[in-house]
Image: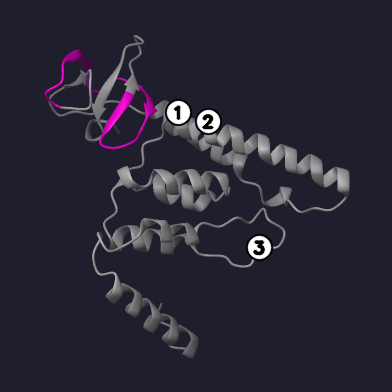
Amino acid sequence: MTDNTEEIKVFKTKLQIFENEYPTTEDFDIGNLTYLINNETFFDVQYYSDSSWLQYFISKYKINANRLNQLMHFAIQQEDMDAVKVLINNQYIISEKELLIASETKKNSEEKIKENKQDGYESYLKSKSKITEISTLMEKYFADNKIQDPDGYTNLRKDKDKSSEILEKIKSGSHIQVLDNSGDWLLIKTKEGKQGFVHRSKIK
């Protein structure tokens, strides 16, 4: 942002005021980031935000991946592929929840396409739809989830606590299914079908 036009100068001033008003992560409402999620499938879209701004604020306020769930779900529903990629690049771990949301969004998009044909008015822009690509990306990252621990293994726990009962030792490199990615302890299922909790830092 090196252009010194009047418009850019005004924008920089407003950005500085905003950052001064919300100087820390605790001050910043992560819900504000939903304004940076685009929906180009809507025929009367009024604005577009470059995804680099989403990355800017995530980096600026050091927002951890365990706080990005609602934002990811919204990005999938809005079919914003660029935003989805930004969140994944910030260590977001794909779970069954995201697969379900992507599947539901795809069904909704198909219904909207049918409605377009029925009334002859294209309120949903099929050419702008990204849900198929998003679904494919979700499935890839979900399938790639695996344990990565320098000790060579990690413990599958009964509860969300490091002192909880150990159900199994999972070898580093083992692929797993992430069922729920909420919080720091993720509910997972091993290839043997056993379910339990693993700290998110052990999943790559």
**Left or right of 76 in this view: 3:** left
Mark-to-mark CA distance, 2 and 3: 26 Å
Where 4 sits versus 197, above or below?
A: below
Nearest to N terminus: mark 2 or mark 3: 3
- Give the residue drawn at x 55%, y 51%: 80
- Give the residue drawn at x 45%, y 28%: 96
Residue sitting at the far top: 192
Residue 10, x across and y down, in percent:
44, 86
In which quadrant of the rendered view does residue 48 lie?
Answer: bottom right
Residue 127 in view? yes
Q: Which residue is mark 3?
A: 45
Tell me whether the residue at label 1 lies in contact with that at label 2, contact meaning CB atoms closer than 8 angstroms.
yes
Mark-to-mark CA distance, 3 and 1: 30 Å
Q: Which residue is mark 2?
A: 100
Assess disc 3: are there few (<14), some (14-19) or many (≥20) residues with their C-alpha within 10 Å of its C-alpha: few
Going by the numbered disc 3, the residue's amino acid type is: Val
Q: Nearer the viewer, residue 50 or 186?
A: 186
**Left or right of 175 in this view: 120:** right
Is disc 3 placed on a helix, strand or loop? Answer: loop
Going by the numbered disc 2, the residue's amino acid type is: Leu
Where 112 sits versus 29, above or below?
A: above
Find residue 171 and name its label: none
Is disc 2 placed on a helix, strand or loop? Answer: helix
Give the magenta range.
162-187
Q: Quadrant of the C terminus?
A: top left
Find residue 96 and name its label: 1
**Left or right of 60 in this view: 155:** left
Nearest to N terminus: mark 3 or mark 1: 3
Residue 175 among magenta residues = yes
Tell me whether the residue at label 3 lies in contact with that at label 1, contact meaning CB atoms closer than 8 angstroms.
no
